[in-house]
Amino acid sequence: MIPEIGLAALWLAAALAALQLLAGFIGARHDNAEIASLARPAALLQAILCGVAFLCLLYVFAVTDLSVKLVATNSHSMKPMIFKLSGAWGNHEGSMLLWITVMAIAGGAIALIERRLPEKTMMATLSAQSFVGLGFYAFLLIASNPFERLTEIPPEGNGLNPLLQDVGLAFHPPTLYIGYVGLSIAFSFALGALLTRNVTPDFARVMRPWVLAAWIFLTIGITAGSYWAYYELGWGGWWFWDPVENASLMPWLAATALLHSASVLAARDALRTWTIMLGVIAFSMSMVGTFLVRSGILTSVHAFAVDPQRGSFILALLVLYIGGALVLFALRASTIAEGERFSVMSREGALVVNNVGLSAILGVVLIGTLYPLFTEAFDVRVSVGPPYFNPVSAIFFLPMMLVLMVGPLLRWKSDNAGRIMKPLALIGAVMLTVLIRSLFYEDIGLLPFLGLVLAAGVAVASVAPLFGRSLRRTPLAIWGMCVAHLGIAVAMFGMAADTAFQKERLVAANVGDIVEVGPWTGQLDTVNAVAGPNWTAMQANLTMSYEGGPGQEAHPQSRNFWTPVMETSEVALLTRWNGQLYVAVGNQGQDGRWQLRLWWKPFVTFIWYGGLLIALGGALALVGRVASDLRRRRHADEEDMEDELAEATA
Amino acid sequence: MTSALKPKHQRLVLIVLAVAALIGATLLAMVALRDQASYFYVPSDIAENPPEPGQAIRLGGMVEEGSIVELPDGVSVTFVVHDGVARVPVTFTGILPDLFVEGSGVVADGSMDVSGTFVAENVLAKHDENYMPRELEDMTPDQVRETIAETTG
């Protein structure tokens, strides 16, 4: 019964999306207030219905209702409850339901809250949002019904891919999806503004908090995904330039550019068309990412099933929405009036460099990701990895970092360099010191070397806008910018330090043997078998000490899952403030020795601290923006009341 | 300075700048891809048209039965990858993927050395019913049957 309720809720939600599309369109087109008044309730009700459908899916997974095909193929009654629930979105159909649920809730939220834009633009926006939604409803209901029943109920389910049975990962897909799909709001606002030819600073102010919110989740999702790959895959890397990672990086790059150009539009009424374009591109990249990841065109742990029908369906949606939006953009862009002028030496000028740099990196990543698919059409199989992505994206990234140091210090519209000489001299001095110090390290490689120097410069520059300000009266949005930029410096430092200074040892050890890596020494004490709820493992027990300090235990495991049958490596991590010891255990050789792989990774944790700082900066900015909007609104209300009072007394 | 420009001209300058940067990025990407993409080879490709020693390539095929030999250092192995036509000897130092067994499909990143041995830097063999290296789809029907029997059986 529950699965049928979920399915019915989905169909109803799809019908409401159709209603919202029509009501919004007619409302915007013919100024018909009566019909337009249907759009907002339709969006709200749709959000509620999708929420109900998603709860139904969670329920069937929680009770392991094996008559539902999705549960039977992806779950197992012996799994811990948290993984039963996370299994609901750890598969194609469930993840698409999550997608549409997030999209409906985001649409419901703007319908409920957003009243600052002209009603006509708002109607066009809601209409666009439901137009995109409808395609995904169709995809879900026609090609990937999550509530499909089985005629023969199997005695037990197939289980979830063991690599996905991890607490961190349980929350990775929802976080990333809120980010991906939250960008649909920017897409819809951009289309709404284009359709009604209403690109104003107000439009940027309205769109900005939504983009910020999506961007925060995207940042957290990417950071968490990177950490997951680091400790779960057992290869000690934190970024593989895997197409799946690129799929999440591309919308992030576009959203980051959008945030910066939206602040130019909001503050200075410049970069109008460009901001609209980025709004379209950001969500387009989310859809391209989904296509790459979910269509089965790439194989990875994320491509749940290879199904050509689904691939072509998503491709058709992609062409329809991205193509449609770009055509609309091409038709309307020339009718948007030029914005305000600015000089090269200004905040706007620096932000243009930021935008061009981010777009160029986006282009580089997109080309590198699609290239193997392109050559495959000619029957040539290639793979593109770090030797391409690292240097080519660095060419654009490094100059961007230099501009990042200067930009936040500059005034809007026009400025002269002389005014900011003092902070620039300080930044330069710090970079020079680090540069000279780094020259003493041998063989650290060009990119890590530049990374260390730039990280030092960006770290100082990120807090430079606070110099000479009263810290208590500094707006939260400025704090947010400083914290986010500091996060970039911290992450960059972590990446550079790990790449430059990591030590790796691969040994075959008997029980009792001494093992060493970098500043760590220790020994393999024992190896024993352990068992979990749905796995058994060989566990190596090591005692390791840092520079002769007290011994710390490490217990890496090589796990065997039974449902489905698969082996995974559980690494052991010993975390210090200045880095992590990373231990993985491999197979036992014929001579009885165990393979151990140890890494000492100096400051590697800074990569993820940096990611979290970037997200925190976004959160501060979001709170600041929303608070000042509320204050302004309250002000306006009071003025209205005063006006009314004045009229009444007159 | 640009402040002397009319708004229309400023917009033009910005468009030119953006287009130039994107075209630059594209050209740079294409040049880099020509050098840096690593090509996929099966053993018969290597026999027919051997890649330069040291050039990054991917090798895919089946691990020959009885060919896995552990070296005395305890962390290196050698094995032979074949595609039913040709054979390539491979050495690898590191922890092998858990599903790496004789007779299974394998994809490895690395390069050929001067003696004609493939030095693998990374071996990918994790595959269950949901995960199979895409390159294996290119194998002969015989090998596909073998792989399927192994992954589902």
Image (tube, coloured by chain):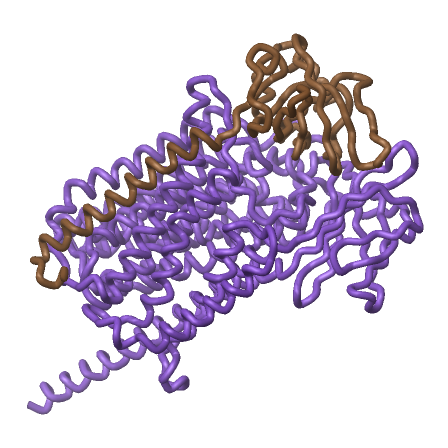
In the image shown, does A132 or A333 lie closer to the viewer?
A333
Residue B3 higher or lower than A628, as above or below: above
- The picture places residue B2, in percent across and down from the top left corner, at 14, 60
In the image shown, does A125 or A17 lie closer to the viewer?
A125
Viewport quadrant of the N terminus of chain A: top right
Q: Residue at x 48, y 63 (%)?
A: A455
Q: Residue at x 62, y 58 (%)?
A: A604
Viewport quadrant of the C terminus of chain A: bottom left
Q: Residue at x 52, y 56 (%)?
A: A449
Which chain does purple denote in the image? A
Rendering quarter of residue B25: top left
Q: Colour of chain B?
A: brown
Horizontal arrangement in the rendering, residue A340 relative to residue A22 (left or right): left
Residue A219 higher or lower than A482, as above or below: above
Residue B51 higher or lower than A304, as above or below: above
Q: Residue at x 66, y 24 (%)?
A: B118
- The picture places residue B13, in percent across and down from the top left corner, at 16, 51
- The picture places residue A421, in percent across and down from the top left corner, at 31, 75
